[in-house]
Image (cartoon, grey):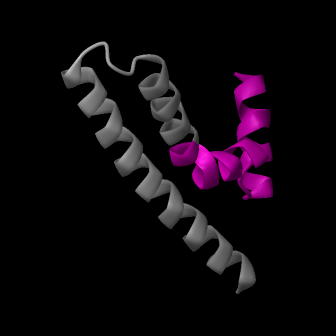
């Protein structure tokens, strides 16, 4: 109970995101896109259904990653 109170006060006192949260907000979709790309390369040709799903995943997550990076860079410049 005391530990939760101390940690809660610390979090409220700082009122900042941790480095992990900042990194996750900025690069999470890029990591997922790279994971899909890796899976696509490893499983290429094993089945058209899985290959298609991985291609779609790479395209969608890659698009999210590009827009997230673009937004984070523009927010940094402000």
Main secondary structure type of the part rendered in magenta: helix
Q: Position of residue 9 (x, y in %)?
A: 76, 45
Left or right, 27 with reference to 62? right
In reply to whether residue 22 is colored magenta, the answer given is yes
Residue found at x 29% / y 41%:
56
Q: Position of residue 19 (x, y in %)?
A: 77, 48
**Location of the C terminus (image quadrant):** bottom right
Residue extending farthest to the front is 45
Task: Give the magenta part as a residue range.
Answer: 1-30
Q: Position of residue 3 (x, y in %)?
A: 77, 24
In the figure, residue 71 lies in which quadrant? Answer: bottom right
In reply to whether residue 6 is colored magenta, the answer given is yes
> Toward the viewer: 68 or 11?
68
Left or right, 18 with reference to 58? right
In the figure, residue 54 lies in which quadrant? Answer: top left
> Toward the viewer: 66 or 52?
52
Left or right, 44 with reference to 53? right
Q: Position of residue 61 (x, y in %)?
A: 42, 47
Residue found at x 69% / y 53%:
22
Residue found at x 59% / y 52%:
25
**Location of the N terminus (image quadrant):** top right
Residue extending farthest to the top is 46
* Relative height, residue 38 to residue 69 (above, below): above
Left or right, 65 with reference to 23? left
């Amino acid at each position: 109970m005391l530990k939760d109170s101390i940690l809660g006060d610390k979090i409220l006192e700082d009122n900042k995101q941790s480095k992990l949260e900042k990194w996750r907000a900025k690069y999470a979709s890029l990591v997922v896109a790279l994971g899909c790309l890796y899976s696509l390369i490893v499983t290429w040709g094993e089945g058209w259904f899985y290959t298609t799903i991985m291609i779609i995943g790479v395209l969608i997550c890659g698009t999210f990653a590009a827009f997230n990076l673009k937004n984070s860079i523009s927010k940094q410049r402000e």
